[in-house]
């Protein structure tokens, strides 16, 4: 149903310097898996078979990461470590086509998504921001697809955000409830706490009908010199219904150091091979 997913990964990763100098921020691992792979797996799990990275010249390691590496596989097999081959070259990647498009200027998230237009064509598609890491029985993207199946309209994942953090997000003005979702009346990018129309914010997963591209093309630069996806959604709402689906599950904002460390600790405590040791270590430190 949704076969294509766009992953914007061209950002400079300023908050993670110097770690993000030679290694893209998206390649930093939560335990043993790069952040970007979690989003790729979430997309493949719902049946996506084309992943479109909007990337930059500096980030070749992302491309390398999603290619098969037979040289290392052979070495692993020769040294009796066959069990690691699946981790090296996961089978789920073999049927997926990975595209890499350079976004040469830092013109914002809206501009990044617009770069995918030619490959996406006339299909509805998903957008996943890899900084936002989700864990739930039914994945965030699957929850969106559930709403998309019922509405055949664009739908964005949202969650509740406290007042002191609301200025970091796209915030919706919610309308009535329809099909397990909320009709969006308006959406504002990064409002001040006082101006926010609600406490319900976009959280990094979207499904769009291809009409979003027409709106991105006529979206002006904002005062920071960026084309905001939120502004294109604001325009799309004038022509089509756009829904917000309240995400049910756990979320880590790995775009911030705090969220990144939180995700690392949470996953370490869930990993049976080390959870006892890690909780002991944490208790000792405290
Ligand atoms: C982007 C979007 C914002 C959204 C957020 C979710 O902001 O512009 O609307 O709420 O992702 O993480 P960024 O985090 O790139 O500043």
Image: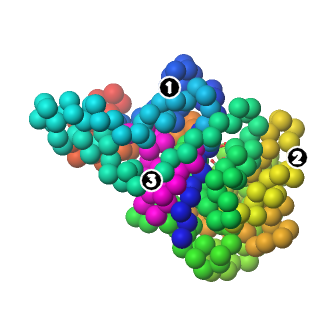
Camera-nearest residue between 247 and 50: 50
Q: Secondary structure at mark 3?
A: loop
Mark nearer the N terminus (2 vs 1): 1
Answer above or below: position of 130 versus 55. Answer: below
Picture quarter with the C terminus: top left
Q: Secondary structure at mark 2?
A: loop
Residue at left 49%, top 36%? Answer: 63
Q: Which residues are magenta?
A: 33-53
Which residue is rendered at x = 50% and y = 25% of the image?
Answer: 23
Mark 1 and mark 3: span between their CA atoms?
A: 24 Å
Q: Which residue is mark 2?
A: 220
Q: Is mark 2 within 8 Å of ligand 1?
A: no
Of callouts 3 and 2, the N-terminal one: 3
| Residue 148 within the segment the image draws in magenta | no
Mark closer to the chain start, 1 or 3 = 1
User: Mark 1 = which residue?
Assistant: 23
Local packing at callout 3 (Cα closer than 10 Å; few below 14, some 14-19, many 20+) is: some
Q: Does mark 3 have its CB less than 8 Å from ligand 1?
A: no
The residue singled out by tag 3 in the image is 96
Mark 2 to mark 1 CA distance (whole Å): 32 Å
């Amino acid at each position: 149903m949704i076969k294509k997913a766009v992953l914007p990964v061209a950002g400079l990763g300023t908050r993670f310097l110097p770690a993000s100098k030679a290694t893209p921020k998206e390649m930093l691992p939560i335990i043993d898996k790069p952040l970007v792979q979690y989003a790729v797996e979430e997309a493949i799990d719902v049946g996506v078979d084309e992943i479109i990275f909007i990337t930059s010249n500096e980030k070749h390691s992302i491309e390398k990461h999603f290619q098969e590496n037979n040289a290392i596989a052979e070495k692993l097999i020769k040294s009796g470590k066959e069990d690691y081959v699946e981790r090296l070259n996961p089978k789920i990647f073999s049927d997926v086509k990975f595209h890499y498009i350079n976004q040469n200027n830092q013109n914002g998230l809206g501009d990044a998504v617009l770069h995918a237009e030619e490959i996406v064509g006339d299909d509805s598609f998903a957008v996943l921001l890899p900084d936002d890491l989700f864990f739930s029985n039914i994945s965030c993207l699957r929850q969106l697809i559930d709403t998309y199946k019922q509405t055949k309209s664009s739908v964005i994942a949202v969650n509740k955000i406290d007042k002191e953090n609301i200025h970091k997000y796209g915030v919706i003005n919610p309308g009535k409830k329809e099909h397990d979702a909320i009709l969006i009346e308006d959406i504002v990018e990064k409002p001040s706490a006082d101006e926010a129309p609600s406490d319900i914010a976009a959280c990094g997963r979207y499904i769009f009908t291809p009409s979003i591209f027409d709106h991105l093309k006529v979206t002006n630069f904002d005062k920071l010199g960026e084309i905001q996806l939120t502004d294109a959604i604001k325009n799309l709402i004038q022509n089509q219904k756009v829904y917000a689906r309240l995400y049910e599950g756990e979320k880590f904002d790995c775009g911030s150091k705090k969220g990144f460390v939180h995700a690392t600790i949470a996953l370490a405590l869930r990993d049976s091979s080390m959870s006892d040791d890690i909780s002991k270590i944490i208790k000792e430190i405290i």
